[in-house]
């Protein structure tokens, strides 16, 4: 999911965007999680999300001060992926989405996204992540999509992936427990 935020996003407007995988923002717009300045607390899991997108110090600054910042600073803080002029935000987000749709195998993207978020949510250790990556690598290696991806690269053409999440998805394995 790509959030294209081409204008101000204050409070819940930003905390909802934090739920996306990537955020493209307007460089001169105002952003902030300002709830503490209104006698409230930040919402939409912003305490969890900000600490993982950035670090605990940046999350504390943003959440405890409630100050606003522009899109360029949002990138510097690690809250956004890219800051562009407002008129270019949506086009860039759509271009990024089209690139993923045209050049990334759906199953590979889904497994990668799931592992990325499960790792953050479940607090897997590096060893558990390595084990899960290996299991998922074995799942996609040798598939028609893996062959198509290599062939398309060698032929210098766009890939034609055939996997479908609706038909081919299997749940992720549970990681091996740490000993």
Image (cartoon, rainbow, N blue to C red):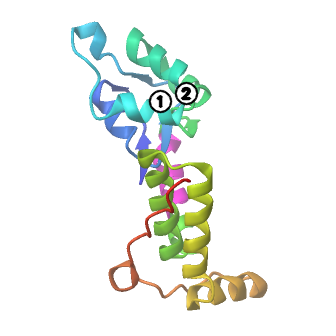
Name the element at disc 1: helix
Let me know if residue 104 appears in the view: no
- In the image, is residue 133 above or below residue 151? above
Query: Magenta stretch containing residue 92, yes or no?
Result: yes
Q: What residue is at 21 percent from the left and 8 percent from the top?
A: 39
Evaluate if marks 1 and 2 touch, with contact meaning CB atoms under 8 Å apart. yes
- Dot 2 alpha-carbon crowd within 10 angstroms: few under 14, some 14 to 19, many 20 or more: few
Q: Is residue 112 left or right of residue 6?
A: right
Q: Which residues are magenta?
A: 87-97
Mark on residue 55? Answer: 2
Residue 69, position as x, y percentages in the image: 48, 18
Q: Residue, x 57% and y 91% (percent of image)?
A: 144
Corner quadrant of residue 152: bottom right
Residue designated by label 1 = 51
Q: Residues within 10 Å of mark 1 (few under 14, many from 20)?
A: some
Q: Position of residue 56 (x, y in %)?
A: 51, 23
Q: How far apart, in angstroms, are the residues tagged by discs 1 and 2?
A: 5 Å
Please state, as top left, top right, bottom left or bottom right, where the N terminus lies in the image: bottom left
The structure residue drawn at horizontal position 48% and vertical position 74%, both measured from the top left corner, is 106
């Amino acid at each position: 999911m790509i959030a294209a935020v081409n204008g101000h996003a204050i409070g819940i407007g930003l905390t909802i965007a934090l739920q996306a995988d990537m955020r493209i923002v307007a460089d001169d717009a105002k952003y902030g999680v300002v709830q503490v300045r209104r006698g409230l607390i930040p919402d939409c899991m912003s305490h969890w999300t900000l600490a993982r997108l950035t670090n605990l110090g940046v999350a504390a600054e943003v959440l405890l001060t409630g100050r606003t910042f522009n899109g360029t600073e949002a990138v510097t803080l690690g809250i956004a992926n890219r800051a562009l002029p407002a008129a270019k935000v949506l086009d860039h987000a759509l271009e990024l989405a089209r690139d993923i749709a045209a050049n990334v195998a759906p199953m590979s993207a889904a497994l990668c996204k799931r592992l990325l978020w499960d790792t953050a949510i479940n607090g897997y250790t590096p060893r558990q992540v390595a084990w899960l990556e290996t299991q998922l690598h074995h799942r996609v290696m040798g598939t028609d999509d893996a062959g198509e991806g290599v062939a398309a690269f060698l032929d210098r053409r766009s890939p034609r992936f055939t996997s479908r999440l609706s038909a081919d998805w299997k749940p992720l394995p549970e990681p091996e427990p740490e000993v």
